[in-house]
Amino acid sequence: MLGLGLRRAAAAALALPPPSPPPAAAAASSMAALLVSQPRYAWLRELGLQEENAGVYNGRWGGSGQVRAGPRARAGAASLEDYEETVKKAKEAWKVWADIPAPKRGEIVRQIGDALRQKIKVLGSLVSLEMGKILVEGVGEVQEYVDVCDYAVGLSRMIGGPILPSETCCLGIDLLLGTRPGHALIEQWNPVGLVGIITAFNFPVAVYGWNSAIAMVCGNYAKVTELIIAKVLEDNNVPGAVCSLACGGAEIGTAMARDERMDLLSFTGSTKVGKQVALMVQERFGRSLLELGGNNAIIVFEDADLNLVIPSALFAAVGTAGQRCTTARRLFLHESIHDEVVEKLVKAYAQVRIGDPWDSDTLYGPLHTKEAVKMYLDAVEQAKQQGGSVVCGGKVINRPGNYVEPTIVTGLPHNAPIVHTETFAPILYVLKFKAEEEVFAWNNEVKQGLSSSIFTKDLGRIFRWLGPKGSDCGIVNVNIPTSGAEIGGAFGGEKHTGGGRESGSDSWKLYMRRSTCTINYSKDLPLAQGIKFQ
């Protein structure tokens, strides 16, 4: 698998920047201002980070593009020339990788998983520092990569196509019926080739891991890597370009989308950008895997166990400060329990511990950027203008960093424009419903179709929810939240979510090409439809 990995993540602003130093002192102080130079963050060097870092890897480290400076360190981004060199090296590396048997490829992926295990706490700390999610979530994200490596190891011994019944007949009338005795019909699966992975700011490690681990055992090569993976490849005498890295911005992403050598492009991000990516890939008749937005709903019926509902809604709406694609943004409550649930939920929100993501007591950290704070405030204001009532939160928290209050809005109609808008922030719209049929329809009326959940004890309702007239989402849950997904199942959604599937089940097929093969082992040549040439 060749992965052209475009890393778009930037550090979350956990503290306000210090005042700019005088010009004469700027150069001298810039190195000391980097976190990697400060004693508290000395652990960053355990991951091989320095003040100056290369942002391109294709068997060797480099990067001749613009130097990108963040609070942690600086890195040389990829130029288009770096990108071109990396693709060429990756194509050459695939010739070696494709000849390695799948179980051996699985063994290398197993070693990657083990190497990640050994550094899981420092890697999780880096994710937390970079994105702003709480430390336990950062470690959990790296654990997802480890888990999918384990899954991929087993998959490496199971990939294969079926032997299908050929149109043979033992009654001696094969030619009359147009059948072909002495033939075998099989499905052959081969790696698609170069896989590009554009990962997202909110799950920079997990998204890459879901794609790369599966793609690698399938015999592809991927563009995205890190020091840990590079070392595993080198220890196994595998060309480093099998997993390449290109840190960059829109220029590199556009090059990936338009590059005919990119056999599969996996993009995780917003629906708006995903649409642009899809159009560029489709223009060249390429293959894309899209995991885009989600306007996810939880539906609570009158027979639901509220002891399950309250913590589920809280976690789904507030976890990662509302910055998951599976975050619950709509909560439909049966009218008979609406007021009771809102009251309990407001009390639960009041107990959410907000603070430094590295503090073990913290459950809720900052938003990723100042732009995210603005989007949050704009959405709250629009909700008010459209008739909503803010019963909890709704304001920026007066502390350093991009902190906002987790927010609950009631009183809006199900089809209010702001309710149908995915705002990547911790805003939960609580809506009333009367009947099953209407609320199932309301669940499906938004453009996205990622995750959904109902809370009920009614067995018939559960199976209607799972059936053709139920949820139209890719993830359809019962009595659990919308957020979170097990790596053994296919992850992704429908409609404007993009239709892609990552991780488990048969998602591996997206990273491969299928050939239907007919083999004639007889001495005859029966033709289709019984045609005979005299």
Image (cartoon, grey):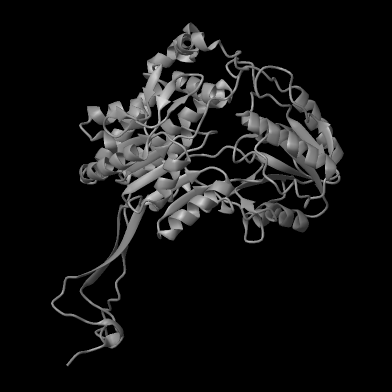
* In the displayed structure image, the side of residue 183 where residue 114 appears, left or right: right
Extreme residue toward the top, this view: 39
Q: Is residue 524 above or below residue 521?
A: below
Task: Work out whether residue 252 can be spotted.
Answer: yes
Quadrant, the N terminus: top left
Compare residues 405 and 465 and report the one nearer the observer: 405
Residue drawn where x is 48% and y is 14% of the image: 34
Quadrant, the C terminus: bottom left
Q: Is residue 40 above or below residue 235?
A: above
How far from the left and from the top, in percent, is residue 326? Answer: 61, 41
Q: Is residue 259 above or below residue 488?
A: below
Residue drawn where x is 25% and y is 40% of the image: 89
* In the displayed structure image, the side of residue 168 where residue 354 appears, left or right: right
Extreme residue toward the left, this view: 523
How far from the left and from the top, in percent, is residue 172? Answer: 24, 84
* In the displayed structure image, the side of residue 70 where residue 5 appears, left or right: left
Extreme residue toward the front, this view: 24
How far from the left and from the top, in percent, is residue 373? Answer: 68, 30
Residue drawn where x is 22% and y is 44% of the image: 92
